[in-house]
Amino acid sequence: TSKDSENSVPKILEVKAGESIQIIVNKAKAGDLILVNPGTNTGSIVIQTKDITLRGIDRNTVVIDGRYEQDNGIIVAADGVRVENLTVQKFRTNGVLVQGGYDSTSTTGANGTGSVTTTGTSVLKRFSVQYVNANANGLYGIYAFSSENGVIANTYTYANADAGIYVGQCKPCNIDVNDNYA
C-alpha cells in the first residue's frame, strides 16, 4: 500500500485523563474517532475537521467544564461531525454549538474564548449530537445555528439560562430532535 492510502484509513485517537482534547482533535482526519477517557477537562473544543466523531467513554464521567470562564464548550464548525456520550457544562454561552457560516481562520480553541467568527455564507450540513448532557450553561445547552440535516437525540439538558436545545437560523433545517430531556 502507498503511504497516502495508509494515512487515509480512519483511526481511533484516544484522549487519556489529563491530556488536551483540542490537541487530539487538531490531529484528527476525516473518518477518525476521538475517544475520551473519564475525567474532567477544562477549556473549549473547536472541531474544524469534517466527518470526525468526538465520543466519551461514559456520558456521566467524561466532563468538559468551562468553569464559567469560556464562552462555548464544544464548537462544531465542519460538516459530518458527531459529538457523543459526554457532559458539557458551565460555559458562559453554549454547551454545544453547531455552527454554520464559520470562518476557520478566526477560531480560538482550548486557550482562547472558544468562539468562531461567522461569515453568514455557508450552512453546516450533517451533524449529530447524541447522548450528551449539557448542564448549567449561560445561554443554550445545545444550539444548532445555520445548520441542517442533523440529529439531536437522547440528550439531557438542565439549568441552562435560556433553553436546553435551540435550533435556528436555518431554512430548511431538517434536524431530527427526539428523545431528549430538557
Image: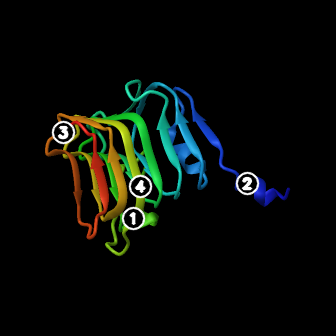
Q: Which mark is residue 127?
A: 4
Quadrant assignment for the C terminus:
top left
Report the Cα–Cα distance between label 4 and label 1: 8 Å
Q: Is residue 120 positioned above or below 23 on the image?
A: below
Q: Position of residue 137 (x, y in %)?
A: 23, 39
Kind of residue indicated by mark 3? Asn
Residue at point 50% right, 39% down? Answer: 21
Q: Where is residue 71 in the image (x, y as percent from the top left)?
A: 29, 47
Residue 149 in view in this figure? yes
Q: Is tag 1's residue or tag 3's residue first in the polypeptide sequence?
A: 1
Q: Name the residue under label 1.
A: 124
Look at the numbered discs 4 and 1 and tell me whether their residues touch, using CB distance below 8 Å: yes
Between disc 2 and disc 4, the foreground one is 4
Q: Position of residue 30 (x, y in %)?
A: 59, 56
Q: Is tag 2's residue or tag 1's residue first in the polypeptide sequence?
A: 2
Report the Cα–Cα distance between label 2 and label 4: 24 Å
Q: Name the residue under label 3.
A: 160
Q: In this view, does 7 lie to the left or right of 16?
A: right
Kind of residue indicated by mark 4? Phe
Residue at point 60% right, 48% down? Answer: 32
Kind of residue indicated by mark 1? Leu
Report the Cα–Cα distance between label 4 and label 3: 22 Å
Report the Cα–Cα distance between label 1 and label 3: 24 Å
Q: What element carries label 2?
A: helix
